[in-house]
C-alpha cells in the first residue's frame, strides 16, 4: 500500500505561546524548520532528509520501527527516496542495522538485472 501525503500540505500553524503546531501530514519537514525559526523556535528531528520528508512520514516512520522490531524482516523496500532515508535513519537509531536494511526499489531492480555488476566494471 502506498499512502501519498503530499497533497495534504496546506496547513502549517505554529502557536509559540502555547508551544503548539497544527500541521497537515504532507507538509515538508524543511518548511516546519523554517517556520519554527521565524518564530524563534526549533523543530528537532533529523534534518538530513528534511527536504524530502513530510511530517506525516516522520510520524509513520516511528510507528513502522515499532512494528519492524517485532518481526524477522531482513529488508525494507520503499519506492520513495525520502521514505527510504527515513527508514534507514530509523533502523540505525534503533540499533538494528546489522539485522535490517532499507533499500529503494530501483536498487533492487538494478541488482536483479545485473546493473550493479556493469557499474562495478565500468566505474560509472
Image (tube, rainbow, N blue to C red):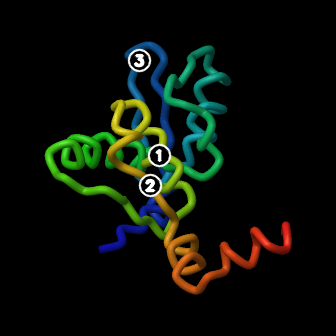
**In the displayed structure image, the side of residue 65 where residue 10 appears, left or right:** right
- Neighbor class of circle 1 (other Cα within 10 Å; few <14, some 14-19, many 20+) is many
Q: In the picture, residue 40 is in which quadrant? A: top right
Marks 3 and 1 close (CB-CB < 8 Å): no
- Residue 45 in the image: state x and y as whole percent: 49, 29
Q: Earlier in the sequence, mark 1 or mark 2?
A: 1
Tally of marks: 3
**In the displayed structure image, the side of residue 53 where residue 55 appears, left or right:** left
Q: Which mark is residue 102?
A: 2
- Viewer-nearest of labels 3 and 2? 2
- Neighbor class of circle 2 (other Cα within 10 Å; few <14, some 14-19, many 20+) is many
Q: Which residue is mark 1?
A: 88
**In the displayed structure image, the side of residue 98 where residue 39 appears, left or right:** right
Identify the residue at horizontal 21%, vertical 42% (top origin).
69
Q: Earlier in the sequence, mark 3 or mark 2?
A: 3
Camera-side residue of 121 and 26: 121
Q: Which residue is mark 3?
A: 19
Distance, label 3 to label 2, CA atoms, is 34 Å
- Viewer-nearest of labels 3 and 1? 1
Residue furthest bottom as drawn: 113
**Quadrant where the N terminus lies?**
bottom left
**In the displayed structure image, the side of residue 110 where residue 83 appears, left or right:** left
Distance, label 3 to label 1, CA atoms, is 30 Å
- Residue 110 in the image: state x and y as whole percent: 60, 78
Amino acid at each position: 500500500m502506498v499512502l501519498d501525503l503530499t497533497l495534504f500540505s496546506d496547513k502549517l500553524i505554529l502557536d509559540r505561546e502555547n508551544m503548539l503546531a497544527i500541521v497537515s501530514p504532507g507538509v515538508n519537514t524543511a518548511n516546519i524548520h523554517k517556520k519554527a525559526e521565524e518564530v524563534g523556535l526549533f523543530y528537532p528531528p533529523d534534518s538530513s532528509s528534511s527536504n524530502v520528508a513530510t511530517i506525516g512520514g516522520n510520524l509513520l516512520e516511528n510507528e513502522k520501527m515499532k512494528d519492524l522490531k517485532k518481526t524477522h524482516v531482513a529488508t525494507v523496500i520503499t519506492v520513495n527516496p525520502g521514505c527510504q532515508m527515513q527508514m534507514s535513519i530509523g533502523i540505525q537509531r534503533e540499533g538494528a542495522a546489522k539485522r535490517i536494511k532499507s533499500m529503494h526499489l530501483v536498487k533492487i531492480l538494478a541488482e536483479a538485472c545485473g546493473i550493479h555488476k556493469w557499474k562495478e566494471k565500468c566505474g560509472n
